[in-house]
Amino acid sequence: MIAADQKGLFLNLRALQDEFLDRVQAISGKPVVLQSDGNFAGHAVIRMATKEHPAHVLLYKPEHQSLLPYLVAFQCELALRTFLASPPNTVRPDRQAGDEGRRAETDAAPPQGT
């Protein structure tokens, strides 16, 4: 009985993982590729698609395979928050903090207290 419950739980987590991947693709119009990387320093990270890279890439360490449904859900939710945020409240992932576009947005903001 326990083995069946554990198997069922795994299948439910896998289905949930797939739902998160599908949501990101539906919202962004770009697929998410899962990529195991033994040299990756963290647990997982999602790298957003760009003009040069047509898919989002979710990197994870192979030793964290058992945590993959959780890592996918967490990273996909971060991506979804970025896509669903209103444009004035987002920082585009293809811009650095010192880019002209970011400075222009800051300069355009009205001074506080006036």
Image (cartoon, rainbow, N blue to C red):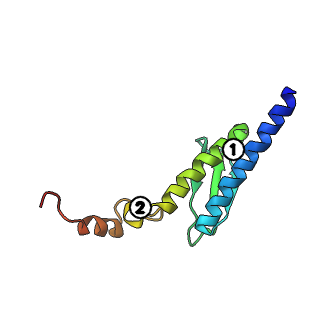
Which residue is painted at 81% across and 38% down in the image?
A: 8
How far across and how far down the image is residue 2, in percent? 84, 27
Q: Quadrant of residue 105?
A: bottom left
Q: Quadrant of residue 97?
A: bottom left
Label 2: how many residues lie within 10 Å, few (<14), some (14-19) or many (20+)? some
Which residue is painted at 36% across and 66% down in the image?
A: 99
Q: Amino acid at mark 2?
A: Val
Given residues 11 and 108, the one toward you in this image is 11
Residue most toward the left?
Answer: 114
Query: Considering the image in quadrants, where does the N terminus appear?
Result: top right
Q: Is residue 57 visible?
A: yes
Q: Is residue 56 visible?
A: no
* 19 shown above or below 87: above
Which residue is painted at 53% across and 52% down in the image?
A: 78
Reading the image, the residue beneath label 2 is 91
Label 1: how many residues lie within 10 Å, few (<14), some (14-19) or many (20+)? some
Reading the image, the residue beneath label 1 is 69
Q: Amino acid at mark 1?
A: Pro
* 38 shown above or below 22: above
Which residue is painted at 69% across and 54% down in the image?
A: 19
Query: Considering the image in quadrants, where does the C terminus appear?
Result: bottom left
How far across and how far down the image is residue 42, in percent? 58, 41
Residue most toward the bottom?
Answer: 51
Q: Secondary structure at mark 2?
A: loop
User: Does label 1 or label 2 sit earlier along the sequence?
Assistant: 1
